[in-house]
Every structure is written in C-alpha cells, then in structure tokens.
Amino acid sequence: MHFVINAYIFGAFYFFTAFLFPYHTCFLLTKEFIHINYSTIPRERKSKKHAIIKLVIKMKVGKKITSLRKKRKLTQQQLGDLLFVSDKTISSWEADRTEPSLDMILKLSEVLTCSIKDLMDDEKNNLDIETEIKIKLTQKEFQTIHSFMDEHAKFLKHGRQKDTYFQPLHRRFLEEETINEWLRIGERGNKKIINYKNWHDNMYCDEYEVEIDNTKNMDKIFHILGLEKIAVVDKTRTSYLYLDKYEIALDYVKELGYFIEIEVKSYTDTPINEYENLLKLTKQLNLNLEQIDKRGYPYHFIFKDL
C-alpha cells in the first residue's frame, strides 16, 4: 500500500508506526513530499520510551553539557564515570549527535549540580515532561478559586476543548493493571493536535504532541493502525498563569463536573521535587488533597466511577 502525505504530519505518522504498530515501515524523502512505502514485515517492537524520545526530543543540550562540565573541571571521561557511561557517549551528547534520555537529563542535573532548566537549549526552556495535579471541586470551590485567580493571577485564555481518546487494538491501554498511557486528538479551535502521555507514579508524565494539518489523512492512518475510539471529553477551560511558574486550568467537564488542574510550566528542579512543590501549593490554595484525581477524565467516562 502506498500513501503520499503532507510533510507536516510525517512526524505523527512515524510516531504511530514506530511506537504503536509492530511492523516495518520504510521512508523515502523527496523535495516536496514524503512518500511512505508500507509493508507488513514483522519485527520486534522496540522500547516505547526510546522510540518516542528519539523522534520528538531535539534538545541540543550539547553546548550546555560542555560548558557545565568544564565549569566543574571535569573531563569527558570523568563525567562519563560519574554517570556510568563511556566518554564516547559524553562526546556524542556534546556534539549533539545523540541526545541523553530523560533519566540521564535528571542524572546530569544532579552530577553537574544544576537545574534541569540550566541544561536546556536557550530556545526551548522545558522538556517534554508534564508535572501536574488535578483535583475535583464542588461548584462553590470552583467559584471561589475562580475569583481568587481573577484577582491574583494572569489570565491566559478561555474556551471549549474537545478531546477524543484512542487505544491501539494490538496493545490495549485499558487492559493494563494500572492505566498509565493515554492517546488523544484534541480540538483547540480550528487546530487538531495528537497528544500522547505516559504517566510515572501519577506524578509526572512524558508528553509528546504534534499538530495535524490534514485530518482526512490522519483518519486513514488511524484506521490502518487499528486505533479504536474509547472516550470523548468535552470541557470548557479557563487558564491562568500563577506566580510566573504554574498554569492553573479551571475546567467544567460535561457529565463530570468541576476540576482544577495545576501544571508546572517552568522547571527549576526534578519532576518529583516539582510534584512535591505542587502539593504544597494546593495546601496554600486551601484545596482538598483527598480529591486529587489520579485517573484522568477519560477513565471516568469509560468506567463511570464518578
């Protein structure tokens, strides 16, 4: 089977074929289009995290690693020994031939005694990580926090958001003992965005997304890859920037009710420590920690537990 798809959704197609679909895909780049020659040759599925990070994260942290390493008066060999990797690996990172994994970024920040933000490229001040807390509210609590944010935070935007969730038939997210993965297409005005999240201990997640500019082709791709729709979440969201660090989203979700979602937008520490700071912030805002929602909106629609 042969397809010609717009270059803007090549990244999305590669993501789904490499990560979700256990078959061989060959790519041939031309000047104007990307031609995909698709053939069903079985192969072993590779590590999901490595597949995603290799595709999506282009951090270019090489110069930062070099600068911080030299500042600590470490050779590439010495830094490699501290991280239990070879000096060739350090050299490859510093030359931006390869990128350190998320785990290695955290270890580098510890070894080089710097924040995660210090390691990031100047043009991109965050990782593909999301650290957040979602809490169910009563209508009265919702109105109270809404008034507080109007007075003490910077208004960002207000609007309707519709998210359609999917899972691959050959690897059903919902059959896992703990559901850590979600895949969705989000409608944001005239935009449609594919978003994938993989949660770690319900505290932070790896998050990757790409904008779709050709919905018809995307529908074909989803059909070919055997992705089934499992839930639709329709909500109205008002967003604020609080303390120049946190994005506060106040959601009214149809059939579910009122929620607040607090997300770290500026990282100065590890995701786990940032999560601890989120817990402190929720207490300062007089929010009920017993109402923290660790399952997510689609879970409640699927299992009807609210």
Image (cartoon, grey):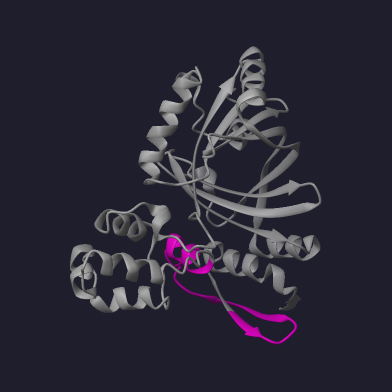
The residue segment tinted magenta is 26-55
Residue found 39% across the figure and 53% down from its top: 116
Judged from this view, the residue extending furthest toward the front is: 71
Residue 232: x percent and y percent? Answer: 71, 40
Residue 32 lies within the magenta run = yes
Query: Which corner quadrant holds the N terminus?
Result: bottom right
Residue found 46% across the figure and 61% down from its top: 48
Q: In this view, does 60 lie to the left or right of 153?
A: left
Q: Is residue 295 left or right of residue 10?
A: left
Q: For the image shown, how many numbered marks are present on the structure? A: 0
Residue 199: x percent and y percent? Answer: 46, 45
In this rendered view, identify the residue nearer to me: 251 or 238: 238
Q: In this view, does 213 lie to the left or right of 78?
A: right
Residue 74: x percent and y percent? Answer: 21, 69
Residue 222: x percent and y percent? Answer: 69, 60
Residue found 43% across the figure and 54% down from its top: 117
Query: Which corner quadrant holds the C terminus?
Result: top right
Residue 41 versus residue 198 in the image, above or below: below
